[in-house]
Image (cartoon, grey):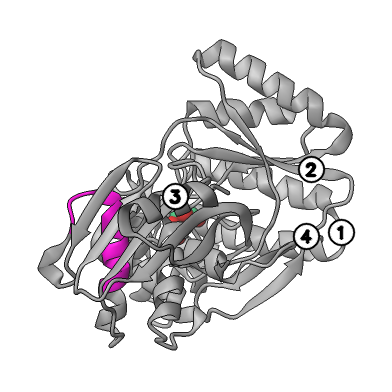
């Protein structure tokens, strides 16, 4: 991590150095677009993320520097002080959400840098939010628990960025544990660390380098579709609060009452919640073949029913199949970003070579390849 770079810039701008905090991005093995439907997810933090140096400055202003973008921002902390730069709005949002919950935040200086690729579906924004939620909680001794730190990041997305996301990314970033995935019930926030050490397999991400922009994408529309179907189902089954509570029979009952598109979206979600539960059972038995089949099932659903894949990601999925990868799918919100692949060790080199060669040939741009290491969550360094 580029700690020296951040230290040098911080010292140059603000004098003496401050404290360092880090929060990671995440992968998700299976369970996509289930979080805001109250379902389950199976993410893990990765060894890449955001690193910030921070120090109280004795004023009521924030002075912030984004090292990777070489941009500076200075802003107050009241609701109408929102900065223009989008990266600074994340920091501002976190401050505001802490203040709304009664936390006393004062002015500080900060510089940050990251090694989690932006717009690749690895939750660089959650990493940024968690870094500042964790850091401010620590330096101002606010006593906020980890659940609320994750919720502060999520609320920042909702209220200051405009993405009506679920809790998965921020939760994984804050709660991550080396060598483990987190089986999270997104309704109750009960969670369990699941050891993840798939012997004989490697987990690798292939980045389509199609940038996904959740705010301007159809992410929020997908969520609205799910809510519309819940409303329809509730007329017969008032106990259904979220798609988590619905089954295919209930969905079938409202077929004539919802749009064909909303129907498809809900069908995907209901199936995906079950796929995740099946994959977790298989994981317990160390049956990676079944886990892999479920991952392919998720890709199919995200591509055909939820329609959040794209030509590049479908192409990568096909190559994975052809090369004997046992599980592959688009990961995260979709609309671009990475596929996550569970690859038998002896097929790894061929898969990576073929994917890079064929993708570059077809699309005229090279995909990026990131081997996955599951790391720890938010921390002070
Ligand atoms: C994005 C959101 C998450 C989740 C995923 C899809 O990463 O931030 O809350 O909905 O998409 O599973």
Question: Which numbered marker is on residue 286?
Answer: 1
Q: Mark 4 points at which residue?
A: 196
Q: What element carries label 4?
A: loop
Q: Name the residue under label 2.
A: 202
Q: Is mark 1 on a helix, strand or loop?
A: loop
Q: Nearer the viewer, residue 332 or 174?
A: 174
Q: Nearer the viewer, residue 97 or 38?
A: 97
First-in-chain label (1 vs 3): 3
First-in-chain label (2 vs 1): 2
| Magenta-colored span | 83-96
In three-dimensional space, the C-alpha distance between marks 2 and 1, rounded to whole angstroms, equals 14 Å
First-in-chain label (3 vs 4): 3
In three-dimensional space, the C-alpha distance between marks 1 and 3, rounded to whole angstroms, equals 46 Å
First-in-chain label (4 vs 2): 4
Q: Is mark 3 on a helix, strand or loop?
A: helix
Residue 63 in the figure: left or right of residue 357: left
Q: Name the residue under label 3.
A: 8
Name the residue rendered at 29%, 79% in the picture: 105
Q: Check the image and name the residue furthest to the front.
A: 15
In three-dimensional space, the C-alpha distance between marks 3 and 4, rounded to whole angstroms, equals 37 Å
- Name the front one of labels 1 and 3: 3
Give the class, few, some or many, for how many residues have Cα within 10 Å of label 2's Cα (few <14, many ≥20): some
Residue 60 forms part of the magenta stretch: no
Q: What element carries label 2?
A: strand
Name the residue rendered at 49%, 30% in the picture: 209
Q: Kindly tell me whether residue 288 is visible in this rendering.
A: yes
């Amino acid at each position: 991590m580029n700690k020296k770079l951040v230290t040098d810039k911080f010292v140059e701008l603000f004098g003496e150095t401050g404290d360092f905090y880090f929060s990671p991005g995440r992968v998700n093995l299976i369970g996509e677009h289930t979080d805001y439907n109250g379902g389950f997810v199976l993410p893990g933090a990765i060894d890449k993320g955001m690193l910030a140096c921070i120090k109280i400055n004795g004023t009521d202003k924030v002075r912030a520097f984004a090292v990777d973008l070489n941009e500076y921002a200075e802003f107050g902390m009241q609701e109408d002080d929102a900065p223009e730069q989008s990266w600074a709005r994340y920091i501002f949002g976190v401050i505001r959400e802490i203040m709304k919950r009664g936390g006393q935040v004062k002015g500080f200086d900060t510089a940050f840098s990251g090694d989690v690729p932006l717009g690749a579906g690895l939750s660089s924004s959650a990493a940024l939010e968690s870094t500042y939620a964790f850091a401010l909680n620590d330096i101002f001794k606010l006593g906020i628990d980890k659940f609320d730190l994750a919720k502060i990041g999520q609320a920042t997305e909702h209220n200051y960025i405009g993405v009506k996301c679920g809790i998965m990314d921020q939760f994984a970033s804050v709660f991550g544990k080396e060598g483990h995935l987190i089986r999270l019930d997104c309704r109750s926030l009960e969670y369990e660390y699941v050891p993840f050490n798939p012997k004989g397999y490697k987990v690798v991400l292939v980045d389509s380098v199609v940038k996904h922009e959740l705010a301007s994408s159809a992410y929020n529309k997908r969520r609205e579709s799910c809510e519309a179907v819940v409303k329809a189902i509730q007329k017969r089954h008032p106990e259904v609060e979220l798609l988590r509570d619905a089954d295919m029979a209930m969905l079938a009952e409202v077929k004539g009452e919802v749009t064909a598109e909303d129907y498809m979206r809900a069908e995907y979600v209901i199936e995906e919640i079950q796929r995740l539960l099946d994959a977790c059972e298989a994981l317990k038995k160390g049956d990676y073949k079944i886990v892999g089949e479920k991952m392919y099932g998720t890709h199919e659903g995200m591509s055909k029913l939820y329609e959040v894949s794209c030509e590049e990601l479908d192409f990568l999925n096909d190559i994975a199949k052809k090369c004997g990868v046992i599980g592959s799918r688009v990961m995260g919100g979709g609309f671009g970003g990475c596929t996550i692949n569970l690859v038998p060790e002896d097929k790894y080199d061929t898969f990576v070579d073929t994917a890079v060669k064929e993708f570059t040939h077809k699309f005229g741009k090279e995909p990026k390849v990131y081997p996955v290491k599951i790391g720890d969550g938010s921390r002070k360094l």
